[in-house]
Image: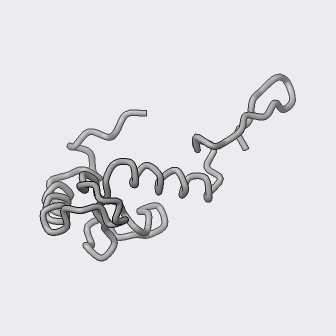
């Protein structure tokens, strides 16, 4: 699935400014892996009421750490689009992800 375009609501100008400020202030990954931070992660997801632009809800991460955290959250939520979901056949040959 492609990332939303920068012009979408989540990636508007206010987000770009906040993101640049977080990465300029904290250039290292917050998980102390030694890599340079290139992405900004919402500690409390927006879908759970997290603030979109509050620096207290944001942390700088490298791409591998951000991917790991996102996959863990998706698995914990039992999201059907999680990469760890296992397909299971149900009636009429349909496939359901658990």
- Decide if residue 28 is on the left or right side of residue 86: left
Residue 90, position as x, y percentages in the image:
84, 32
Task: Identify the residue at the far front of this view.
Answer: 34
Task: Identify the residue at the far bottom of this view.
Answer: 56
**In front: 82, or 27?**
27
- Decide if residue 89 is on the left or right side of residue 33: right
The residue positioned 29% from the left and 61% from the top of the image is 29
- Decide if residue 79 is on the left or right side of residue 32: right
The residue positioned 75% from the left and 29% from the top of the image is 95
Task: Identify the residue at the far right of this view.
Answer: 91
Residue 52, position as x, y percentages in the image:
31, 65
Residue 76, position as x, y percentages in the image:
62, 59
The residue positioned 34% from the left and 48% from the top of the image is 63
The residue positioned 74% from the left and 35% from the top of the image is 96
Colouring mode (rainbow / by chain / secondary structure / one colour): one colour
Residue 68, position as x, y percentages in the image:
47, 52
Q: Quadrant of residue 45?
A: bottom left
Considering the image in quadrants, where does the C terminus appear? top right
């Amino acid at each position: 699935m492609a990332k939303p375009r920068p012009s979408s609501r989540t990636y508007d100008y206010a987000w770009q400014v906040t993101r640049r400020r977080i990465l300029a202030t904290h250039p290292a990954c917050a998980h102390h892996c030694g890599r340079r931070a290139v992405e900004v992660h919402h500690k409390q997801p927006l879908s759970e009421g997290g603030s979109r632009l509050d620096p207290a809800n944001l942390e700088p991460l490298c791409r591998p750490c951000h991917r790991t955290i996102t996959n863990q959250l998706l698995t914990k939520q039992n999201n059907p689009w999680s990469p760890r979901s296992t397909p299971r056949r149900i009636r009429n040959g349909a496939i359901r992800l658990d």
